[in-house]
């Protein structure tokens, strides 16, 4: 389908769709404008100096020739005079005798021939027409046989030469009907102007040199333009190839192939873009893996209480169960449904915390909130045989936090402290202002957290001892961390196994 291929190529070359075409067009316009201007300017200057060079070269030659012709011209003139004298005497004699003699060429042609040969050889050497004029501006001899002798030339360069000045003219030649460049120089003897030498070359010689110069310049310009276009294509491809690769990889990623990466080995901005893309793809795949693990863990955690409830319900249906057993099953069903309810509440809280902090959250004085939660947890601590003390100032610097989030934080921390501290122990809540933050500390004298577990206790569904702890879900601390980090705060644990634990929260003060 060659037609389709052409259509595809044309489609790709469309400047609206292709960066390469746009780069080529911009570069080509700039190059044509800049290089075109440069070629025109340089060409014009070169043409001018070329013409000047030819003109002055011809003028110099005319001067040299004029100098060299001084003596031969004087000889020629004396021969001419002698010849004319002799001819005159012959004529007078003939007139007296009535005879018509044949003695014209007796001695004049010898000098004449030498002079003409000299002019012709100069003309050949110079590749120019050499014309010699007398002081009366009439032609004595010309190397070009088409030029009629004894004609007067009153052209500007001849008149200028007669006045010992320099001039040149480019004009139509009467004898050859072509455009020629003329220069002339005076032949100066002891008595002043003895003649003029005129040199001329066809303008076509000059035009040819000018044309050749323009051809070279324009060819160089075109080669440069071509090089620029090739460079633009190369540059365009350098940019667009990785972009096309990026597009294809993004489509594959969107299609569900999370393993694709660009892995481009470049150090430029496109390399940075590719590295950012790979980083994003890595983050997305890790996020999805975490989400999948979360869903799997959540389902697992939800299934345990549901299975326990189902089992107890089936046992209750059995008629053989006595009252004491029925009572126990009902208690266990209530306990499991409470666990289930707590877990669902934690999942809901986590989902809510994951959405970024609400912009309408107002600055909150967290002291009353902390006191309220402390009071609410007091009965639970007493039931567990613990002493719960609170050290919370009358008021604290405000933090931008919803009251509900403040309650979730302290409730979860206290819940853990009570859960993991054996009867007779102590739990203390402290709050204070430190630097730019408000600090909340929950300290207990419980079992503590093993050093190897400390880095993981804020992970979702992480429990130090799953077998020992049947009531926890492993979500409490991850919920606390989610809320605190969403509010640009920090949370950490300090503990020595067997010697209690301290959970510390820092929340930035509201500006
Ligand atoms: P859970 O709901 O199981 O308590 P958390 O996310 O609140 O889950 O806590 C994670 C784990 O960290 C717990 O399983 C527990 O082993 C440990 N932990 C948390 N707080 C304390 C504490 N005050 N003392 C000892 N261990 C703690």
Image: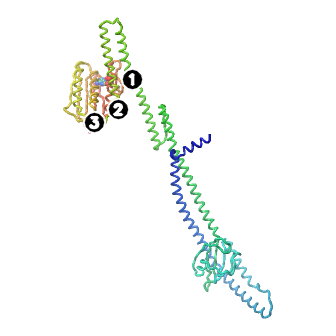
Q: Secondary structure at mark 1?
A: helix
**Would you name the residue on which mark 1 appears?**
297
Tell me residue 263's x, y (percent). 48, 37
Q: Residue at x 79, y 86 (%)?
A: 102
Comes first in the chain, label 2 or label 1: 1
**Would you name the residue on which mark 3 appears?**
508
Tell me residue 166's x, y (percent). 58, 77
- Is 470 located above or below residue 407 in the figure? above
Decide if ligand 1 comes within 8 Å of the CB at mark 3. Answer: no
Residue 460: quadrant of the picture: top left
Q: Depth-wise, is mark 2 or mark 3 nearer the camera? A: 2
Comes first in the chain, label 2 or label 3: 2
The residue sitting at the left extreme is: 394
Please say if the residues under marks 2 and 3 sit with CB atoms less than 8 Å apart.
Answer: no
The answer to whether residue 277 is left or right of residue 366 is: right
Q: Secondary structure at mark 2?
A: loop
The answer to whether residue 233 is left or right of residue 79 is: left
Q: Quadrant of the N terminus?
A: top right
Q: Residue 355 bears which disc, if any?
A: 2
Tell me residue 501's x, y (percent). 28, 25
Q: What is the spatial separation of the Cα atoms under label 1 and label 3, in whole angstroms? A: 32 Å
């Amino acid at each position: 389908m060659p037609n389709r291929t052409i259509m595809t190529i044309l489609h790709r070359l469309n400047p609206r769709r292709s960066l390469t075409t746009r780069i080529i067009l911009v570069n080509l316009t700039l190059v044509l404008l800049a290089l075109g201007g440069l070629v025109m300017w340089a060409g014009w200057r070169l043409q001018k100096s070329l013409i000047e060079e030819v003109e002055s070269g011809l003028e110099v030659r005319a001067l040299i020739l004029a100098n060299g012709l001084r003596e031969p011209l004087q000889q020629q003139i004396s021969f001419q005079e002698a010849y004319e004298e002799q001819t005159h005497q012959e004529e007078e004699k003939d007139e007296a005798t009535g005879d018509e003699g044949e003695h014209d060429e007796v001695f004049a042609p010898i000098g004449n021939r030498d002079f003409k040969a000299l002019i012709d050889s100069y003309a050949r050497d110079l590749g120019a027409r050499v014309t010699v004029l007398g002081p009366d501006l009439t032609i004595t001899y010309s190397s070009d046989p088409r030029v009629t002798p004894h004609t007067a030339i009153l052209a500007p360069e001849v008149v200028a030469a007669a006045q010992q000045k320099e001039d040149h003219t480019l004009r139509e030649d009467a004898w050859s009907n072509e455009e020629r460049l003329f220069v002339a120089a005076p032949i100066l003897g002891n008595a002043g102007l003895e003649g003029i030498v005129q040199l001329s070359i066809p303008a076509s010689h000059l035009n040819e040199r000018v044309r050749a110069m323009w051809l070279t310049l324009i060819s160089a310009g075109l080669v440069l333009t071509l090089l620029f276009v090739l460079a633009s294509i190369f540059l365009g491809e350098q940019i667009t190839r990785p972009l096309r690769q990026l597009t294809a990889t993004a489509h594959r990623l969107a299609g569900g192939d999370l393993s694709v990466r660009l892995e481009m080995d470049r150090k430029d901005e496109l390399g940075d873009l590719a590295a950012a893309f790979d980083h994003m793809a890595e983050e997305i795949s890790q996020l999805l893996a975490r989400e999948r693990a979360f869903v799997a863990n959540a389902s697992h955690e939800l299934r345990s209480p549901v299975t326990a409830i189902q089992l107890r319900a089936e046992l209750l249906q059995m008629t053989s169960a006595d009252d004491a057993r029925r009572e126990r099953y009902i208690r266990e069903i209530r306990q499991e449904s409470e666990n289930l309810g707590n877990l669902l509440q934690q999942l809901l809280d986590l989902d809510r915390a994951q959405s970024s902090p609400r912009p309408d959250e107002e600055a909150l004085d967290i002291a009353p909130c902390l006191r309220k939660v402390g009071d609410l947890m007091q009965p639970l601590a007493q039931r567990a045989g613990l002493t719960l003390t609170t050290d919370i100032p009358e008021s604290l610097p405000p933090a931008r936090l919803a009251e509900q989030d403040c309650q979730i934080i302290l409730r979860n921390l206290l819940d853990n402290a009570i859960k993991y501290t054996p009867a007779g122990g102590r739990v203390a809540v402290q709050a204070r202002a430190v630097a730019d933050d408000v600090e909340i500390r929950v300290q207990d004298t419980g079992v503590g957290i093993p050093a190897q577990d400390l880095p993981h206790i804020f992970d979702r569904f992480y429990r130090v001892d799953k077998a020992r702890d049947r009531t926890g879900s492993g979500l409490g601390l991850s919920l606390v961390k989610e809320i605190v980090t969403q509010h640009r705060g920090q949370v950490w644990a300090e503990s020595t196994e067997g010697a209690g634990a301290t959970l510390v929260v820092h929340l930035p003060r509201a500006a």
